[in-house]
Amino acid sequence: MSMKTKLIAAEIVGEFHWGYSIRAVSESAAAHPYPVPPPSTLIGALSYSFSRLRKLGECISTVKDNKIFLASRALMFSNIITWATFGFKRDEKSNKIVLAQEYSDPIRLFRLIYQRGVRHEKKYKNMWFGVAAHGKVYYPSGQFKIIYLLRENMLLKNIGESEDIRKIIRKACFSINRLGSRESIVSVEQVKITNNIDVIDPPENTSFYFPLRLVKFYATERGELVKLPVFDRKSLERGFIFRGDKLWIGDHESFIVPTIEWGFKGPGKIRVESLSENGRLVKMFFDDRSSETIVVSGEAIGDKD
C-alpha cells in the first residue's frame, strides 16, 4: 500500500554507557523514571543534534492564542518527525543479553527554595536540605535501536533544497550523544536511511514499542505494558512550549514494549495479529538488505492529512 506523505526512515543502532534517567512528567521531588525513553525524548535528541550541526539555538519563539511563548526547538522538529520509536537490541557480536533494571538512588537535595519565612534564617540551616529518590534505569552497555519517520518536504524546507538530505540526516543521527538526562550518555554505532517504505498487513513481528490503542490483538507474553506520555501533536506541543499548558500525570497512555518475556526488559520481538482502525504496519527496506517493521498511526503516514 502506498503512502500519501513522502517519508524518509532513519534507523539508529547505539549503546548506552550505564543506562538512562528520564524523569516522568509532573514529577519533582520524587523523580520516578520512565522505563524506556518516550517518543518526546527521541524527538528532542534528534532536534538537539540537528540544532548543533546547523548552529541554531536550542529555543524558538512561537505564537499561541495571540501570545508569544518560548519553546524548545524540538517543537519545530515535531512537525518534521511524524513518528519515533525505540527498541532494545541484542549485541550480535557477543550474543549477550542485557536487561534494563529500574532503580532509585537516594540523593541530598537543597530544599530552601521551597521554604519561606524564618526557615531562611541561618539557625535553621539544618532544615535547608532533604533526601529524595532519584530514579534511574540501569542498562550497562545495553544496545538499543531507534526509528524515525521524517517528512522529506518539511526537512528540505528547513535545511535548504540544495542540501544532501541523507547526508544531513546521517550526520545528525551520529551526533546524538544522550537520551534523557545529561548523564544518560550513548554511543551511536550505525545509521541506516531509506525511502523504501511500504504499508503491510498483519500479522507481523516488531521489536519496537507502540501505543496500545493502535492494535487489537498481539502476543501478550512477549510484550510489557508501560505508561508513557501521550504521543500526538497536541501533547507534544504542550510539552515543548515553556510556561504554557503543561502535561500532567494523567497525560499518559499505555505502550507495549517488546521484551524477551513479560517481566524481563531486554531485546525481544512481539507478533502483532491485528490492528485498530487507526493502526498501520510499516516495513522499511534498507540498502544492506535488512528490514524493520513498526506500528504507527494513520496520521504518521498521511492517511488523514
Image (cartoon, rainbow, N blue to C red):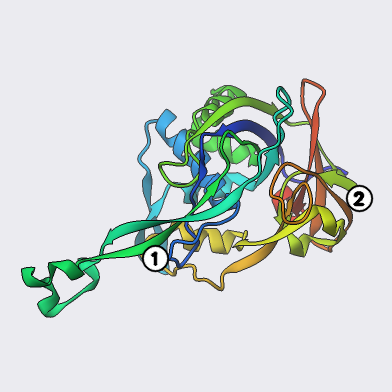
Q: Which disc is residue 53 wearing?
A: none
- Dot 1, crowdedness within 10 Å: few (<14), some or many (≥20)? few
Q: Position of residue 59 (x, y in %)?
A: 36, 47
Q: Quadrant of residue 182?
A: top left
Q: Which disc is residue 28 wearing?
A: 1
- Dot 2, crowdedness within 10 Å: few (<14), some or many (≥20)? few
User: How far apart, in angstroms, are the residues tagged by discs 2 and 1?
Assistant: 41 Å
Say which residue appears at 57% left-offset and 29% top-offset: 169
Q: Quadrant of residue 87?
A: top right
Observer able to see residue 11? yes
- Name the residue nearer the viewer: 94 or 305: 94
Q: Position of residue 106 (x, y in %)?
A: 39, 58
Q: In the picture shown, does residue 85 fall above or below 298?
A: above
Q: Mark 2 belongs to which amino acid?
A: Pro
Give the position of the C terminus as an image quadrant.
Answer: bottom right
Give the position of the N terminus as an image quadrant.
Answer: top right
Q: Position of residue 68 (x, y in %)?
A: 34, 61
Say which residue appears at 38% left-offset and 67% top-offset: 66
Residue under label 2: 202
Q: Which residue in the rendered view is the most extreme toward the left?
A: 122
Q: Mark 1 belongs to which amino acid?
A: Ser
